[in-house]
Image (cartoon, grey):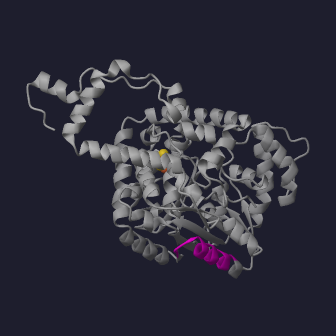
Amino acid sequence: MSRTFVGMPAFPEAAHEAVGNRTLRRNLRHATHTIRAKRAKAVAEVSDWAELREAGRQIKDHTLRRLDRYLVQLEESVTAAGGTVHWAADADEANRIVTELVKATGESEVVKVKSMATQEIGLNEALEAEGIRAYETDLAELIVQLGRDRPSHILVPAIHRNRGEIRDIFRSRMGAWGRPAPEGLTDTPAELAEAARLHLREKFLRAKVGISGANFMVAETGTLVVVESEGNGRMCLTLPETLISVVGIEKIVPTWRDLEVFLQTLPRSSTAERMNPYTSIWTGTTDSRTADGPQTFHLVLLDNGRTDTLADQVGRQALRCIRCSACLNVCPVYERAGGHAYGSVYPGPIGAILSPQLRGTQSEIDASLPYASSLCGACYEVCPVAIDIPEVLVHLRERVVEGGPVTRGGNKVVLKPAKGHAAERAAMRAARWAFSHPGALRTGQRLVSHSRRFHPRTLPGPGRAWSASRDLPAVPAEPFRDWWRRTHGGKDTR
Ligand code: SF4
């Protein structure tokens, strides 16, 4: 079983530890720079990328505004196609539903397609507590599971591992989970992939129950879509007799036409491919005598904080996310801190805005996440559904500051980071006063301009470290409003 994120320290503490790990930094730098360069090339090939991005944004916003209607339509479509829909308000309810469904089949093991939603609810751990073993079949998830590790990237959960580490994990741990690694296994990619293939094949052929998430659900036909690169998902979706899919309610799109947009933007943004190697699409159940696919299909629709997120007018845009991970790969903070520091299955910029909304900002880790960013905006630039992550981060910082005490392990602790917040609050109060007193603002601006020769080049006190590596912006010789009046001959509009 992989370790969970429960009890992780706040971001600054966890990141501090990660930044000191040279191997981790080297692994992350190499991987993120490689993926980001490939993505940029793949996106540049598409002449109407900006239009596709805007279409994706509009489709998601339209769907989220009418989510109640589309979810009911989806339920009717899935039911009509032979599936059964279950509604789960939170992680506990979803885990209970899935556990009971597996138990009803009489099976004690399941194969899994890579799924963020099942990681979010801790499904593997919940199944294990009931004596059911869940086998991850995605190569990177397999590495994480065998290494008793935690995922650190949305798309490449074992991005923090290099080939040598993976070889060692396979050699030492595969035998405990089934077929051992071949004798003399080296760290060449082909050998590692073959070892995983042999290890997983016996599980695919034996499994009677598969568990998946979905990238998209099409409301008009009740169709689910999984995109992947390895083919393990296709095996899990077609071989077992029973399929249970746990999917967040925001993964819905109204029509197949809408799906067309995301099947263009997702592969280029995530793996820099023009098209996903495997796009598995299924609707309800199949007759085993005539077709591949599940004879029994259950869809568990997961809320777990999503409707609360939807109620926040600024924060709701996080629900547009299609989990491409492009924002992680360009983020300077993620590149140095790694994914574990975010204390959630959703790391990087999207994790910094999604986790505090799904879980609330009352815990120390969630209250620290909106600060895990330099607000450089690179994440927004690459996001294929135009989520303005910096805007949401600033909005969530406000929520943290206004929200009162945070907790660690159920106990209240001082609002974190207390010093920063107090200074920030004082600065904001001063700014509010100045902007609501234009006369004083104008006098202050002139004073600052006239005394610019005497301004220090570095900040005093606690600001010294900040200004030691930065140039303070130059103060203009003349305030903007004076310049405007002089050059345009008009009045100060205040
Ligand atoms: S926020 Fe945007 S860039 Fe980041 S994972 Fe989601 S869709 Fe991709």
Q: Answer with left or right where residue 23 lies relative to residue 412.
A: right
**Residue 23, percent from left and from top:** 73, 35
Looking at the image, the residue that sits furthest to the bottom is 104
From the viewer's side, name the closer residue of 276 and 464. Answer: 464
Is 57 positioned to the left or the right of 458 in the image? left
x and y percentages locating residue 205 in the rendered image: 76, 63
Judge left or right: residue 340 versus residue 332.
Answer: right
Question: Up-down: is 14 above or below 71?
Answer: above
Q: In this view, does 483 lie above or below 415?
A: above
Toward the right, the furthest residue is 183
Image quarter in which the C terminus is found: top left
Magenta residues (range): 88-102
The secondary structure that dominates the magenta segment is: helix
Residue at (84% x, 54% y) in the render: 174
Position of residue 399 measured from the top left corner of the image (x, y, whole percent)? 43, 57
Q: Is 470 on the left or on the right of 29, as rendered?
A: left
Q: Residue 61 is drawn in which quadrant?
A: bottom left
Q: Which residue is drawn at 53% across and 26% down?
A: 468
85 and 3: which one is in front? 3
Q: Is residue 208 visible?
A: no
- Residue 106: x percent and y percent? 74, 80
Q: Which residue is drawn at 53% across and 56% down?
A: 415
